[in-house]
Amino acid sequence: MIKDELRRGIIHENPILVLALGLCPSLAVSTSLQNGFGMGMAATFVLACSNVIISSMRRIIPDKVRIPCFIVVIAAFVTMVQLIMKAYLPALDKQLGIFVPLIVVNCIILGRAEAFASKNSISKSLVDGIVIGLGFTFSLCILSIIREILGSNKLLGLKFFPGYEPMTIFILAPGGFFTIAFVMAVVRYLGNRRKGA
Amino acid sequence: MIDIIKLSFMLTIISVAAALLIAFTNLKTRDRIHEQQQVAQQNALEQVVPSGMSINECNGENPPCPQQYWIAQDGTDTVFIFKIINKGYSGNITYFVGTDRNGSIEGMSILEQSETPGLGSRTQEEISDKYFWNGLFSKKETGKSWFSQQFKGINLNEQINIEKSVGEWHKLGMEEKEKLISDNAVTAITGATISTQAVVNGIQDQARSYLKAIQESNDDQG
């Protein structure tokens, strides 16, 4: 059960590499492993909580204005998380500070609210938020490892290859697109091969 | 018609509830956030001056003096510290610059910035020369960022040049670093010339006139 859910979030419904959602924040933050992992964990937390809140409110929210309601709920929640982080975890806030407001407009969160949490029970929505968040974190980590090594010859801020001159383009947006495209192609190839066998 | 009123009513209720929750959180965390900002500011101030100097806050009376600045003293040495806010590539960069009476920069430290991660955000980057496989579990150095270190010895009363052709400061040898100081130049961050320019411009436009204004007001009194 847990294994199936994890496989669904990380492989079959991987938000970046399969559903191609949330590419915008992914491009922005996958420049270093520390940033990618931090953003992934922050998004997972917000995703799980917003899924729970929206699922518990799914009978009150009128169908016709559900999207503005979701955005209000998510934005309010993110703002509160940000204030609490600033007050009690300043070191973490310094690392993630600029990404947290980005979570509000992250379409993965709105997408899960619309496609899943507004139709399913609270416990199911919580699990969905966690596994999709982990899928997001996992793909961000892969992208950022590749980009950090190629683009700045570092991993977690430490040097990687001796005597390699980094290609700055991999830190910039075009390099992000290249990396996403290559990783996506590999994932597709592996998926197709499995289906064929 | 009834439908529209009903929908607007629900939307209003949800928005008001969300606003109340945020207001409540803000009320509860405001003091604590202010405290944390004070701590961050104090740490940044201490990085600007040689360790062991005591820092006192001062208030400038009238413009062009800055409303708030700091003076650090150690015997006969005096360092003036100014808080500078200048627009970077995305949002403001806030930083402190410490300078002696002649305009020679004692230190610089970035307090806040929201530049592009991996590019402009490297104004705060600390370089480690360890390799990944043997440095991962060793303790991280918490020194100053290379970008701010290169400002020491630069004179803000003269034109500060931005050197783009020699590579970044932390890769240079002693001789090249000395040559930069004699040229009154700092190196740009690769791919983030606008952020570099913003920091340099802020020093030239703001710190220079602050220093001049404070010296003039001191001369009047003395």
Image (spheres, helix red, strand yellow):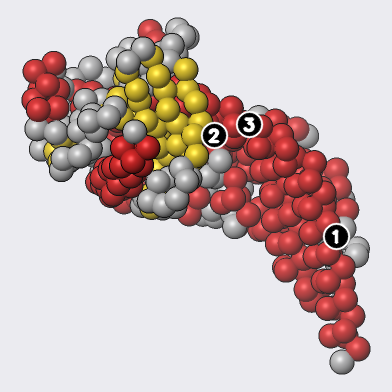
Residue at the spot x=74%, y=50% of the render?
Answer: A77
Real-space Cα separation, disc 3 to disc 1, in angstroms: 28 Å
Give percent across and percent down for residue A104: 63, 54
Residue at the spot x=32%, y=18% of the render?
Answer: B77
Q: Which mark is residue B17?
A: 1
Is B134 rendered above or below residue A99?
A: above
Q: Which residue is mark 2?
A: A94
Taking A139 as reference, is A146 left or right? left
Taking B106 as reference, is B184 left or right? left
Circle 2 — which element? helix
Callouts 3 and 2 on one subunit: no
Circle 3: is it few (<14), some (14-19), or many (20+) Cα within 10 Å? some
* Residue type indicated by callout 3: Gln
Circle 2: is it few (<14), some (14-19), or many (20+) Cα within 10 Å? few
Real-space Cα separation, disc 3 to disc 2, in angstroms: 11 Å
Circle 1: is it few (<14), some (14-19), or many (20+) Cα within 10 Å? some
Residue at the spot x=8%, y=18% of the render?
Answer: B175
The answer to whether residue B211 is visible is no
Real-space Cα separation, disc 1 to disc 2, in angstroms: 29 Å
Q: Are marks 3 and 2 in contact (CB under 8 Å)?
A: no
Residue at the spot x=91%, y=63% of the render?
Answer: A59
Q: Which mark is residue B36?
A: 3
Quarter of the picture holding the N terminus of chain B: bottom right
Quarter of the picture holding the C terminus of chain B: top left
Q: Nearer the viewer, residue B82 or B199?
A: B82
Q: Which mark is residue A16?
A: none
Q: Nearer the viewer, residue A126 or B172?
A: B172
* Residue type indicated by callout 1: Ala
